[in-house]
Amino acid sequence: MSSVGFVGLGAMGEPMVRQLVRSGHEVAVHDLDAQRVQALARSPGVTPAPSLADLADARLVICMLPDSSVVGEVVSGHSGLLSVLSPNDIILDMGSSDPRQTVALAASASAVGVHLVDAPVSGGVRQARTGELTIMFGGPGGLLERCRPVLQAIGSSIVHVGGVGAGHALKALNNVMS
C-alpha cells in the first residue's frame, strides 16, 4: 500500500506521518485543526484531506485519535469513513480505545465490507519520530500481513496479539502496568 490515509495529527500522529513518508508512502492527512493539516501538507508526499471524504481513495486509513468516542464519530458518524471507503478497505485504529467499543465498531464496518482492526502503540513521541514504536495488532493475521508494510514504517516491533480488540486490551493492561 503506497497510498495511506491518516486521521489525527497530534503529538504522535504528525511524526508517524513523517515516518510513513520517509518510507515511500504517499499520505493524505486529515485533522480537525486545518492549520496542522496545511503545515504537514507542505512536506513532499503529504496531501491535505480537508474532509473525511477526501480519504476515499486510500485503501488503508490510520486513526490516531484520543479515544473510542472520537474514533466512533470518525468511522461511523455522519459522513464518516464507512460512508466513503470501499469494500475490503482497512481502518487501523492506533490510538488507545476501549476494546469492547472496538469490537462493536469492527462489526459495523464489517456490515459494509470494510475491515476495522486495532493496532495501538507503546512508546512516546521520541519513538514515533524514529519509527521505533511497539505495535500491538488485534485482528486477523491476513490483515496484519496487508498492513505490515505500513506498520514497519512506524514500528520496530509488531506483535499479533489476537482478534479485533485484543490490541486495545493489551494496551490498557500496558498502561496500568506503567
Image: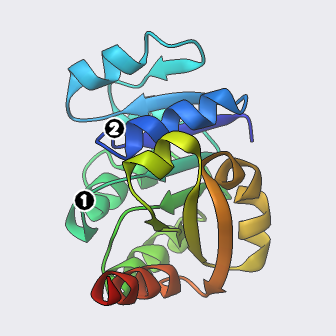
Residue 57 seen in this snapshot: no
Q: Position of residue 20 (x, y in %)?
A: 61, 36
* Kind of residue at badge 2: Leu
Q: Identify the residue under disc 1.
A: 66
The CA distance from mark 1 to mark 2 is 11 Å
Judging by the rendered image, the residue that carries numbered circle 2 is 9
Where the N terminus falls, by quadrant? top right
Q: Residues within 10 Å of mark 1 (few under 14, many from 20)?
A: some
Q: Give how far across and how far down residue 41 sits, in percent.
A: 43, 16
Which residue appears at 28% of the width and 88% of the height?
Answer: 176
Q: Amino acid at mark 1?
A: Pro
Q: Nearer the viewer, residue 106 or 30?
A: 30
Disc 2 element: loop
Q: As rendered, which of 59 and 176 lies closer to the eye?
A: 176
Is residue 53 in view?
A: yes
Q: Position of residue 18 (x, y in %)?
A: 52, 31
